[in-house]
Image (cartoon, rainbow, N blue to C red):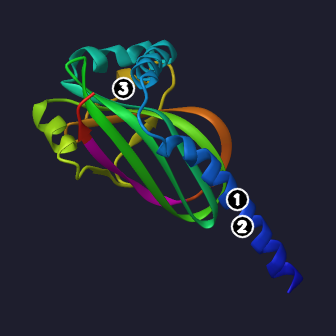
Amino acid sequence: MIKSMKTMKVLLIALAALTMFCGKAFAGWDPADEMNARQTIEKFKHDDPSLDRFFSRAYGYAVFTDIYKGGFMIIGGGHGKGMVFEQGEIIGHSTVTLLNVGPQLGGQSFSEIIFFKDRHALDNFTKGNFELSAQAGVIIVKSGIGTNTDYSNGVAAFVLPNAGIMGEITIGGQKFSYKNGK
């Protein structure tokens, strides 16, 4: 009985923390979104200048400034919001929802950029049914990594850790939504 109460208390604290992290991600769009997206782009370029080839050649990209993720025991998830660019101009907003299954504990936030090689890849994303599965490679940004990376099915995804700590051995995916307009 005492052990289950302790487990329940830890679970409630973890859920409360996840709610606090996700609260910001669920907030409405504000004028600072564009500025934050452009700052995130500059941070990716600064941390790995070889990604410039993606920025200069991609037909479009989605920039997620902060994705908040948390997990406890065998289930975890996360959420974030971003802006979608077509040939360097903002065309809409997007959200991402993550779900992971497997042993995990902790919380973190990270930035993610998904590059679309051509119009067809961007159109698939903007239809609102886009997903990245566990098999799709999301690459953690390190200097020079963009040089050795190429598109898979017209898409390349990169993440940059922001804060937090998380231990996990999970399988999961990311589901995206899209809303047209600035």
Task: Specify the principal SS of the magenta part.
Answer: strand
Q: Are marks 3 and 1 in contact (CB under 8 Å)?
A: no
Q: Earlier in the sequence, mark 3 or mark 2?
A: 2
Q: Is residue 176 magenta?
A: yes
Of badges 3 and 2, the one in the foreground is 2
Q: Residues within 10 Å of mark 3 (few under 14, many from 20)?
A: few
Residue at x 64%, y 48% (from the top left corner): 20
Q: Earlier in the sequence, mark 3 or mark 1?
A: 1
- The alpha-carbon separation of the residues under discs 3 and 2 comes to 41 Å
Q: Give me the disc on residue 14.
A: 1
Is 170 on the left or on the right of 42, as rendered?
Answer: right
Is 74 on the left or on the right of 64, as rendered?
Answer: right
- The alpha-carbon separation of the residues under discs 2 and 1 comes to 5 Å
Q: For numbered disc 3, what is the local secondary structure? A: helix
Where is residue 15 shown, x and y percent of the image?
Answer: 66, 60
* Rendered image quadrant of residue 35: top left
Q: Tell me the quadrant of the picture where the C terminus can be found.
A: top left
* Amino acid on which disc 3 is placed: Asn
Give the residues drawn in magenta, as a range: 170-178
Q: For numbered disc 2, what is the local secondary structure? A: helix
Name the residue that disc number 3 marks: 148
Where is residue 153 shown, x and y percent of the image?
Answer: 20, 42
Q: Give me the disc on residue 11.
A: 2
Is 56 on the left or on the right of 145, as rendered?
Answer: left
Residue at x 39%, y 15% (from the top left corner): 50
* Rendered image quadrant of residue 144: top left
Q: Residues within 10 Å of mark 2 (few under 14, many from 20)?
A: some
Of badges 3 and 1, the one in the foreground is 1
* Amino acid on which disc 2 is placed: Leu
Task: Between residue 118 and residue 2, name the one nearer to us.
Answer: 2
Q: For numbered disc 1, what is the local secondary structure? A: helix
